[in-house]
Amino acid sequence: MEILARTRMIRISPRKVRIVGDLIKKKNINDAMGMLLYMPQKASGILKKLLDSAIANAKQKKYVDIDNLYIKNVVVDGGPTMKRFLPRAMGRATKVRKRTSHITLVLDES
């Protein structure tokens, strides 16, 4: 049985989250949690909180064995982009895109 956890509108680029998400994919939840604790990236803290939420969702279901769970998939999609402008030389302006992410974490029993 699959267990889902989602977070939306996270203020980090999806490209940065995918790097960390691909590292923990197909791992046991205990191994993934250990990896996320010691990674220096900002995305690791976000994914750790999301993994905690998914584990809490699994504990709500009586027929799921927590010790046999692994991360089946991590999907990182782009959310809406905030557009800002930065003043430049000679009266010009450059566009600054502040990207957001939608993250879906899927757990399953092995």
Image: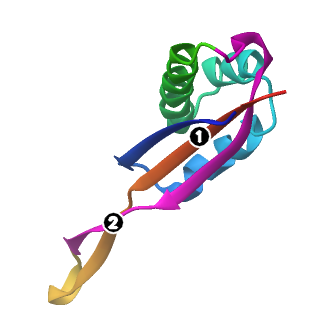
Q: Residue at x 23, y 78 (%)?
A: 88
Horizontal relation, residue 91 to residue 65: left or right: left
Q: Residue at x 67, y 48 (%)?
A: 19
Q: Position of residue 78 (x, y in %)?
A: 46, 63
Q: Residue at x 42, y 42 (%)?
A: 7
Q: Nearer the viewer, residue 64 or 86?
A: 64
**Chief secondary structure of the magenta portion:** strand
Kind of residue sitting beneath label 2: Pro
Outermost residue, front side: 63
Q: Which residues are magenta?
A: 63-86
Of marks 2 and 1, the one in the foreground: 1
Residue labelled with disc 1:
105
Query: What is the basis of the colouring in this image?
Result: rainbow
Q: Nearer the viewer, residue 24 or 16?
A: 24
How many numbered discs, if any?
2
Q: Is residue 28 above or below residue 14?
A: above
Q: Position of residue 49 (x, y in %)?
A: 48, 25
Q: Quadrant of residue 66?
A: top right
Sequence-first disc among 2 and 1: 2
How far apart, in angstroms, are the residues tagged by discs 2 and 1? 20 Å
Q: Residues within 10 Å of mark 2 (few under 14, many from 20)?
A: some
**Quarter of the rendering occupied by the C terminus:** top right
